[in-house]
Image (spheres, helix red, strand yellow):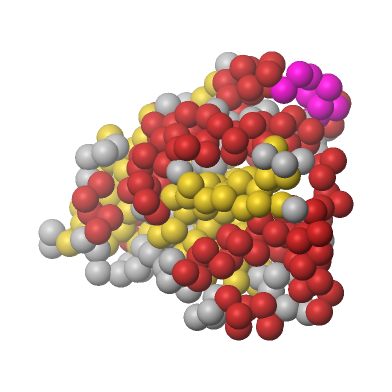
Amino acid sequence: MDLEILDWPDGWEDFGTTVFPKLNAHHHAWISGVANGLSHQTFLVRAKEEGLVTGLLPLMLVKGPIFGRFLVSLPYVNTGGVWAKDESVATGLVDQACQLADRLDVKYLELRHELPVQHERLNFERTDKFHLRLELPSTSEELLKSFKSKHRSQIKKSGDYDLTVQFGGKDLLDDFYGVFARNMRDLGTPVFSRRLFSSLLREFNEDAEICVVRKENLPIASAFLVHSDGVSEVPSASSLREYNRTNANMLMYWHLLQQSIERGSRVFDFGRSSESSGTYRFKRQWGAEPSPAVWQYYVRSGSPEEMRPDSDGKQRLVKVWQHLPVSLTKWIGPTIVRGIP
């Protein structure tokens, strides 16, 4: 088996030439979109046998002035990690990734797996997050019938508030980002840059859409929707809290699901959530089924627990951030969050 570490985008064409199914996040548009949007140095660990690709592992160097350096597969997106034909290939890819982590002197290597890889150097694991995915029927009528009556009535109730729903691309980016940045500030979380979403729109082209819900022409909810290989997913979605009574978020997700069915998707990926959290319950009521995320680490210094938003000291920072002007968070937030794995 031949193993090598390439500088992205060298070797990207191999993502389309393997003979086994790739992970959804291991898509050229995802990797290039995030790498360019967040300005991360990106590597590709590749395994070949007799000229055939038998394994791939994309990695991004996440670094910033506050938290240090990390090697991640993949930041921002829900999944990543090793993509290999068998256990021996997976072991070889992790060997190379750990050596790269040593060479780059990062705090830790983070692999966002769904199935764990057995490797002696992976010395920490997180299983507190769950992916929530819904198998889509062939028509939106079938999907609506599958909901409980209370859920259908919540969708219907949004019609009492004269809300409008619009899909588009870069023409809706400012509306999307305005709602997204406001919601992130309210949550006490630094916001990603507008450049990230612009980069993803460019890379995915017609396979990425923005959905905006308005009340009297004011954007009150918005979502970023990506279609790829029969899967539609929402990496980012937000709604303004003061309009919760309108059920704008319910209306938006109903339209996202309808749009995904019309695009021929077989699965709708709601993203990851902590079990029993509010977002977990919201996604489950649509019929989404949970599956565990298994994030594995090669820790060289510190602890991945230090980066959790509920860790010691972080809650005080969250409360401070919630009181900052949104314009200020748009300015300083992207610099901070691009350095968080």
Which residue is more in the foreground, 333 or 341? 333
Horizontal side of 259 relative to 201 (left or right) equals right
Relative to 341, residue 230 above or below: below
Horizontal side of 111 relative to 252 (left or right) equals left
**Residue 112 location in percent, x, y?**
53, 52
Horizontal side of 252 relative to 39 (left or right) equals right
Which residue is more in the foreground, 170 or 95? 170
**Residue 206 location in percent, x, y?**
37, 51
Query: Residue 177 lies in what quarter of the image?
Result: top right
**Residue 302 location in percent, x, y?**
65, 32
Relative to 49, residue 327 above or below: above
**Residue 260 location in percent, x, y?**
51, 65
Horizontal side of 226 relative to 306 (left or right) equals left
Q: Residue at x 67, y 39 (%)?
A: 217
Q: Residue at x 38, y 64 (%)?
A: 229
Q: Residue at x 52, y 51 (%)?
A: 167
Asked whether the viewer can see residue 87, the reply is no
Magenta span covers which residues?
318-326
